[in-house]
Amino acid sequence: MNIDIDDILADLDRDTTAVDQTLTSQGQNDTTVFGSDVPGSDKAGGAAVSPVRDFEALMTHWRNERLSPELLPYPHALMARMLRRVQEQLEHIECISMGYLETLGEEDNDAAGDSGSNSNVLNKLPLLCMEADLERLKFVLRSYVRCRLAKVDKYSLYLRQLAQDNERMVPLSGLLSRQELEYHERHSAILLKLLNNTILRHMPPELQAVDDNEGSVKMVEEPEWDRFVFVYVRGPSSPRDPDPALEVGPDGQCFYNVMIQGLREEVELTVGGIYVMRYNVVRELIMEGKVELI
Amino acid sequence: MYGDLGSKLVLEAKRAQQLSQSSGSDQLPLYQDDLVRNILREIAHLKKNAEILKSQQELENFDNKVAKCQYFVTLLCMERNKRCLLAYQKLRSDALDAAAWNRNGLDAMSSLNTAKDGSTNLSHHEQEYLKDYVQLITDMKSGDYTDIDLSGSLTPPSDVFIDVRVLKDAGEIQTEYGVFNLIKDSQFFVRQADVERLIQQGYLQKL
């Protein structure tokens, strides 16, 4: 066994570039299929779709979702692309491990000038890397979806109230995915059934509501709007299109002005800086993707 | 005294919460059927009192401040009792939710449903709720999220392959890398994704 580390590295390089190419071509497909789906709903909003940028956007969404007190809008197009890529990658790995790409592997071996006994090792290592990578992506997606479902449960009544409120800018179907809507619907139905059967049914009629805000204590739990969060100011998504809200200070530094209502105080958020703020102060900027939660 | 039963129920809920936190298991104590029923009875009683007080006030043209206060406190008591009841039930249903996610479906039902002496700690309605919720989770997992395995582990994966020790005999399992015969106390080096389920069900332990 004389495996040269260079050979393995070369093989890895070839493999990753190959994957990149296939993914890029998929990315181009995506623009045609999903590009016009929900304009501006993604962080990338308008910029060209690429797997790398999608992954970064997903990580941002994931962090924001886990740290924000409220349920953030669901990135429909991004998640659809991500889920599709996971499926394709699964099939890809399946193909390689089953040996359907045998011919490709042999070429690689010839190029690397290795004997047949090494081919097994050389094929397995990139495969292992790809599998590890896929597992990580699956974990992020899983964690993201579960985090959202937990919030759907927590703010179940609040979301229901939002749905009845017609003056909202974003409809509930934009905030939640189709699956989340269904989950919300069904879970609150069975929970209400349980509460009704055990308690509410036996109460006097005026005490039977579960979303009564008139009493001494509000029954509908709202997100904690003024919770403190750590934020990183990212600046506009691309330097080419200037942001009207962005101001340039005398020393050439770019910053956003935000108003803290309670204190009647203006604060400058310098691009690249890290701040601790109340959530409702920076909420708008988070929605626009100019500021990230960390 | 009015409200005493409510506090008792809240204490009971608190106890259940601490129990599950300290032991780390999804066990729920016995459903306090009697207590809940007594509180409901107390609410009905309070309701009757409130009505009497109200009619008295109408006779006295609403200028008796003491009676007014009495009426108000009665209403508050009713509301408080309701909150206690709902909080108790919500805590239990949340625990059921967690159990349904952590242990896959039917497993959670069987372990929660049958306590040691064969009786159940859940009320009839709670059993029904658990069944519905498990069904809901199963439906969520099939659909679009099949590939990412929603009920999988929520700790970030470190390696594709891990060492596991077998805690209970589980027979043979078939994976891409061959067949493993899971005999108690033996040790294997396997792909994490393949044995995730068995770890959750308590057959294997990650080393």
Image (cartoon, rainbow, N blue to C red):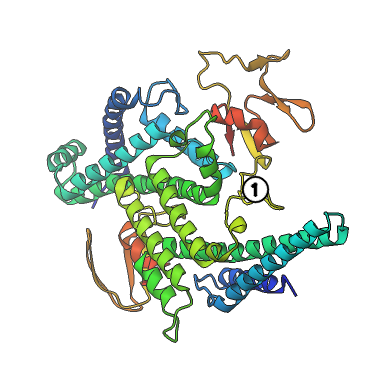
Q: Foreground residue, A240 or B27?
A: B27
For badge 1, the amino acid type reads Asn
In the rendered view, tell whether residue A208 sits above or below residue A46.
below
Horizontally, is B201 left or right of B26 in the view? left
In the rendered view, tell whether residue A21 sits above or below residue B65.
above
Residue at 48% over, 58% down: A191
Q: Position of residue A158 (x, y in %)?
A: 56, 45
Q: Foreground residue, A92 or A280?
A: A280
**Residue labelled with disc 1:** A213
Give the image quarter of residue B153: bottom left
Residue at 41% over, 67% down: B128
Residue at 20% over, 49% down: A97
Q: Foreground residue, B185 or B138?
A: B138
Q: Position of residue B177 (x, y in %)?
A: 23, 60
Q: Position of residue A89 (x, y in %)?
A: 28, 41
In this rendering, the count of numbered labels is 1
Residue at 47% over, 28% down: A43
Outermost residue on the front side: it is: B59
Query: On what subunit does the disc labeled 1 rest?
Result: A
Q: Secondary structure at mark 1?
A: loop
Horizontally, is B94 left or right of B40 in the view? left
